[in-house]
Image (cartoon, rainbow, N blue to C red):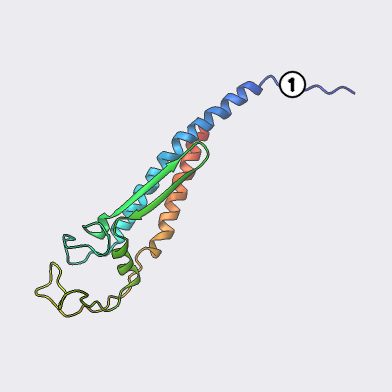
Amino acid sequence: MYLTINARGIQLLQQKIAAKQEALITSIPRAMQQISDDAISVLQVATPVGSSDGSGIPPGSDAPGRLRDSYQSDITSSDTEASLVIRTTQPTKLGYVVNGRGWVYPVSKKALFWQGLPHPVKSARPSQPNDFITPELPAIIDRAVLRIEAAIKEAMDV
């Protein structure tokens, strides 16, 4: 019995695989940026807007400004993996909105004051939780899946 293996096309196959890998390496980060842009846009639209213009002193170590303008993304990618993190520069404020907060009393003065109040006050009432993020997650995930599938299809069509 004789066994003959014909591997004439192996080099061409290796070149095609390398081209598809290279295409993935460039299309996935682009898709990650699109996913980031989509997610931030959805969050900005869903974020409740208060009566303040965001110019007051922010709570904790938060950045100043409006919460809806505080979303940022960190994208990292390599030849073997990619990750995307959406974060806010105002985590304390986001926590107050999503989880609510209890009564607020002055710590070092006799009254509370912040820009937009008609006068200093002795306390601030609790705020109710408003989890505006959770209802948006399915849409964000669905869009992300579509973007990744499109990136893979684009790479495979090379």
Query: On the rendered image, what quadrant is the N terminus found in?
Result: top right
Q: Residue at x 47, y 36 (%)?
A: 154
Q: Residue at x 17, y 67 (%)?
A: 51
Q: Residue at x 30, y 69 (%)?
A: 96
Label 1 amino acid?
Answer: Asn
In terms of secondary structure, where does tag 1 sit? loop
Give coordinates of residue 69: x percent, y percent. 25, 55
**Foreground residue among 116 and 27:** 116
- Give the labeled residue for mark 1: 6
Q: Residue furthest left?
A: 118
Q: Residue furthest top?
A: 8
Q: Is residue 140 above or below residue 7?
A: below
How many other residues sit within 10 Å of disc 1, few (<14), some (14-19) or many (≥20)? few
Q: Is residue 84 above or below residue 139?
A: above
Q: Residue furthest right?
A: 1
**Foreground residue among 86 and 23:** 86
Write down the quadrant of residue 102 in the picture.
Answer: bottom left
Q: Is residue 19 above or below residue 130?
A: above
